[in-house]
Every structure is written in structure tokens, then in C-alpha cells.
Image (tube, helix red, strand yellow):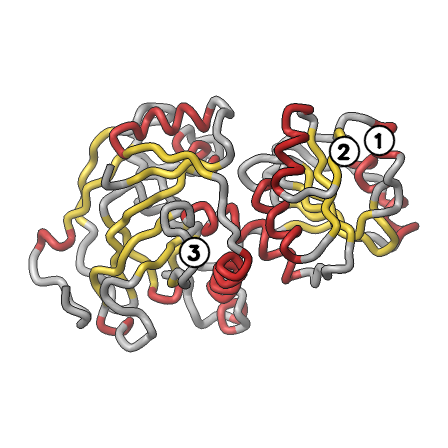
Amino acid sequence: MSNQPVTPSAESDNHIHAWAAPAAGQPLESFAFDAGPLADDDIEVSIDYCGVCHSDLSMINNDWGITAYPFVPGHEVVGKITRIGEHAKNKGLKIGQVVGVGWNRGSCMHCHPCVSGDQHLCHEVQPTIIGRHGGFADRIRSHWAWAIPLPDGVDIASAGPLFCGGITVFNPLLQYDVRPTQRVGVVGIGGLGHMAIRFMKAWGCEVTAFTSSNAKRDEALSLGAHRVVASNDSKALAEIANQLDFILVTANASLDWDAYVSTLAPKGRLHFVGAIPEPVPVHIFAFIGKQAELSASPTGAPARLAEMLAFCARHDIKPQVEHFPLSKINDAIKHLHAGKARYRVVLDMHA
């Protein structure tokens, strides 16, 4: 394969085969579309692996009321660059390079958030599966800056979930200057939570895992948690009052938030990355008395993605995944929907 960027030479270069939901909640079907000419600032990736995320399920079922059908899911893409647009040349990318594309595939690159390094907060950010076709396909395109090279030491077969779930739990560690001397908590031991525990353990923190499932106690300890507290045990929560500097909520269910606030140390932070479907009622006096903070965040910027991958390579961190061949794509979706995944699902696009 040539190492020189190429430009589209025929209509067939723009013909992409994918798997799409024809309507809300329907099984995915074979689907083809014309992606048009490759934009000057874009690169094209031949997809080898793609994670299946709960956000894909939400979009398939139109839970957020924004899905356009036919809908192609997939935003945890890993593959090799096959084409490079004219303006994307000489930007450090090359044909055959392994890259990942996550929740976002583009941004305006000129607004204040973009030039400040917060491209994921751009008002014109381009989510990979909202308003465009995603990565359950043979190829995908993104702006060159959003195609993040995988460093040596990162396993390409399990890396896909890092580009959504991974960066979602890693970014707050940088954003809020979590220190290795601090005591931290992770609420929810699932697709996000299991990666959060691994990151925080490698970060050097003392990690408390909160779970409502006794069956996950040993799993949480094996992932690196120093202790496990039953999230529905008021006595156990009371025993760790005023101890935690940072609590990361990865769960997507309503809980007794005042009980968690009570476990925060002075100047502690309760931070949400899980999509809680209902309002979060808290008593502000509990925050005032401790000078505590409540916050939330989405995914992360390209530079943060690159830092996360370097951290994973250094500490041999990878998501715990289950692989499904592409021929079993609907089985993979059912498996995740049933809550059986331990802890992320990845499609092998060539299997």
C-alpha cells in the first residue's frame, strides 16, 4: 500500500456499506449510501473494530427524540487510514496508520472553545452518530484532528470503547486536577465504571467502588478498587462520611444523592458522567457547609484523547470487552440491551 495520500478517483470510492436500523427499535439491516467526495479536511478510515455503546441503543430506539432513519450506529471506531483529504495532508497522519474515532468526528476549529483546546464543547461540534452515519460500516470519515493515532502498547481489538466511555471517565481526572493522594469513589460498576476504577487505581488514588449488586463486589476489587460499599446500605454510607475528595457517578439511575454528598470531604466534588434520566435533587446546605461542588461533563477533546491513550499504554489499561462477529451484530445489540455485557461489547468488522 502506498504511503502517499490519495484523492477520490471514482464514484465507487464514496460508496459505503453499513448496517442501519430502518425504524425505532428495529433490527439492523444491510444499508449502503454515497458519502460524496472526501472533504479537504477529512480522512477516511477502513474500520476493523467498533464498540457497541448504550448511546447507540438510545439512538436506535430514538430515546432522545433526535434519531433520523435509516440510522447507522457506531461511535467507538478503530481502523486504518485509507484516504487523506487535500488539506489534511502533512498533519502527522499517514495511509495505513491505526486511529480511533469516538463520539465526535469534527468541530469548527475556529471558535473560542476550539482554539482553547476544548473542541468537544464547540457549538458546531459534529457527533459521529447524530445527523450522520456512524461506524457500523466498512468505512467512516472524520476531520483529521478527531482521528486519534493509537500508540504502541494499546490493543487495537479492545481500544474502541476508550474513545467514548474511556475518555468520558478519564477527562474529569484532568479537568478537576484529581491528585494521587486523594480518596475517590466510583458509583456504578459497568461499562463506564469499570474503566474509571482502572484509571483511578493507576492514577494512584484510594478507590471506593459503590454498587447495589453484591455479585459485583469481587469484580470491583479485581478491577482495582480498594474497598466496595453497598450503595443501598445507609449504614455503610454513614461509616465513610466526610472521607471522599471526588466521586464520579457513572450510573444512569436515580439514587439517594444526599447520602453520597454526606461522604464527601471538605471541598469534595460530586461529578456526573452518567445520563441520569430524572432531576437530581440535593440540599444545597450540604454543599455550602463543606464548600463542596457538583459538576458534570461529556467526553473530551482530541488532546485529552491522546493523553488517555498514552496513559493506557504506560499502565497497560484496557477495557474489559466481549467480541461479536459482524454477522452477529443484532445479537450483540440484544446482549447489551439485556444488561449482560461484561463490560463493553466490540464488533469484529471482518469476522
The residue positioned 63% from the left and 62% from the top of the image is 174
Nearest to the observer: residue 155 or residue 184: 155
Q: Residues within 10 Å of mark 1 (few under 14, many from 20)?
A: few
- Amino acid marked by disc 3: Val
- Furthest-left residue in view? 10
Q: Earlier in the sequence, mark 2 or mark 1?
A: 2
Residue position marked by numbered label 2 in the rendering: 229
Residue position marked by numbered label 3 in the rendering: 154
Q: Position of residue 217 (x, y in %)?
A: 68, 30
Q: Position of residue 204 (x, y in %)?
A: 69, 57
Q: Is residue 56 visible?
A: no
Left or right of 125 in this view: 222: right
Q: Residues within 10 Å of mark 2 (few under 14, many from 20)?
A: many
Q: Position of residue 319 (x, y in %)?
A: 49, 44
Left or right of 134 in this view: 240: right
Residue 36 against residue 249 in the figure, above or below: below
Question: Could you give the CA–CA distance between mark 2 and mark 1, rounded to whole angstroms?
Answer: 6 Å
Q: Which numbered tag is attached to residue 236?
A: 1
